[in-house]
Amino acid sequence: MSTLEGERYDAVIIGAGMSGLAAGIRLALFNKRVLILERHNAPGGLNSYYSRSGLRFDVGLHAMTNFVRQGVKGTPLTKLFRQLRIPCEAFALCEQYGSRIHFPDVQLEFTNDFTHFESQIADKFPHEADNFRRLVVALKAFDETALDYQPCGAKDVIKKFIHDPILTDMLLLPLMYYGSANENDMDWAQFVIMFKSIYCEGFARPFEGVRCILRELTKKYKSLGGERKMGLGVKRIHTLNTHAKALELDNGSMITADHIFSSAGLVETLRLCDDQPPNTGGEHIGKLSYVETIHALDIQPSALGWKDTIVFFNTQKEFTYRCPQLPVDLHSGVICFPNNYHYVNDEPLEQGWLRITALANYNYWKSLAPDAYQDAKTEWFTQLTSTALNCLPPVSVDVLKSHTVDIDMFTPTTVERFTGHLGGAIYGSPQKNRNGKTHLDNLYLIGTDQGFLGIVGAMLSGISMANYHVLKND
Ligand SMILES: Cc1cc2nc3c(=O)[nH]c(=O)nc-3n(C[C@H](O)[C@H](O)[C@H](O)COP(=O)(O)OP(=O)(O)OC[C@H]3O[C@@H](n4cnc5c(N)ncnc54)[C@H](O)[C@@H]3O)c2cc1C
């Protein structure tokens, strides 16, 4: 046996995040011998969970987008359940109370009923109501999933319909925070995907949070005979001409596979290849990263008057979505209350939770020595909390402190550590590769850098790439 031969699989998947698990299920459903390799001990990438001092922290999941009620056909969520052969009840999704886009002089509420959003726009922006309706008609007629789509900026397209820059910014803020790898603008197809998934469909969450989704995905994968190795990453992809010949793992062992799917990211995957491929330069690494603060509370947020599910806030006249010069951009962000969903029988979560997300500067956080890093976390945790409190029904910092039982905060370096995405780029590279192809004929991208973002998007990415590159040829 040559040194480049090891155990052989039909398909190997790099990463046990949402896209990797979904691709694994899809391939295993068609009797492929599949192996998922994950560098960390837990699945889910950063969209995972941990326990500390008896508290169960959820990272990642604010909300599952794309929620539709049972019986609604032909939507991404129904396609997802059908393709994975998982019953929709398995995710036990509960609907949001309602969310809000908060700007200095105007607010727009939205729920899982699109007509409510339309009436909010007619109410707050009466001069734009017809234009908004025309925008909706145009985006509903657009095929945002076409694999041969040529990217173009969303702002230029929106401008053809909406003339009020504040409404444009308000529409963009939630969609950018939940799914744009581009600074200052957003790709039009991605805008359409996110618009439909957030405004036309909606938000939901399982009572148990992301644990429930990961448990169902791993259960299904294992039941189909799918194999996985946790705590074992891919160190190198050995190539021969235009073919990925073998995978060298962190422990030095070798694996061979007919097909390799990577959720590690574009540059990250290409840098694993030993043939020095193009497109591995820093310019392809995403610049957008986040911090998130987490307060665990001894009280339900609604008892403090906080009844929104998610608040997307902007404190300036204009909304800017770019890597900030300061460590954290305090001008905009997302406030999430995982408690504020319609759980079965109104059962409350054991703990109250307040999570605040904002844009952050990776280079700053990366440059800090351990002590300075802790100090910076303390300082920016405080600043971000007080900014967010100004966008919520009034509760003083002291009252919040008196109800806080634990806190945590992640930074861009945490994102990088748990997802492997360089620069802590939440949504990966601005350069997406819709058909998943790379310079090697049997190596494909899935997940973040294939271009379907978010939890539902990542799962659909894994499914569609498995179908496109392997199953359609069977
Ligand atoms: C903080 C945060 C909050 C979010 N909140 C939401 C939300 O509320 N709703 C929503 O829809 N979306 C949310 N998202 C986005 C969503 O989580 C992601 O778009 C989606 O989970 C990406 O999945 P993925 O499979 O593409 O990649 P990832 O989750 O990044 O998974 C990649 C996996 O590959 C592994 N890996 C990388 N390199 C290697 C290697 N060489 N060898 C082995 N393994 C490797 C990593 O360890 C990781 O587990 C959030 C993301 C973050 C970071």
Image (cartoon, helix red, strand yellow):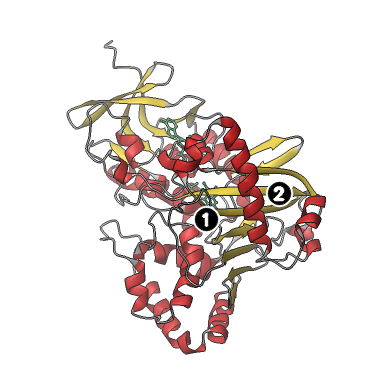
- Whether residue 16 is visible to the viewer of this picture, yes or no, is no
| Amino acid type indicated by mark 1 | Asp
Q: Secondary structure at mark 1?
A: loop
Residue 254 sits above or below residue 286 on the image: above
Q: Which residue carries the number 2 mark?
A: 295
The number of numbered badges drawn on the structure is: 2
Residue 17 image point, x, y percent = 49, 40
**Residue at left 73%, top 68%?**
393
Residue furthest top in the image = 1
Left or right of 405? Residue 92 is left
Q: Position of residue 235 (x, y in %)?
A: 38, 24
Q: Residues within 10 Å of mark 2 (few under 14, many from 20)?
A: many
Residue 224: tell me if it is visible.
yes
Q: Quadrant of residue 301?
A: bottom right
Residue at point 37%, 37% (across, down): 262
Q: Quadrant of the C terminus?
A: top left
Along the line of sight, which residue is nearer the eye, 420 or 204?
420
Q: Quadrant of residue 384?
A: bottom right
> Which amino acid type corresponds to the residue marked 2 in the rendered image?
His
Q: Position of residue 392 (x, y in %)?
A: 69, 66
Q: Nearer the viewer, residue 110 or 294?
A: 294
Task: Write down the residue under mark 1.
Answer: 329
Query: x, y percentage for residue 247?
Result: 34, 24
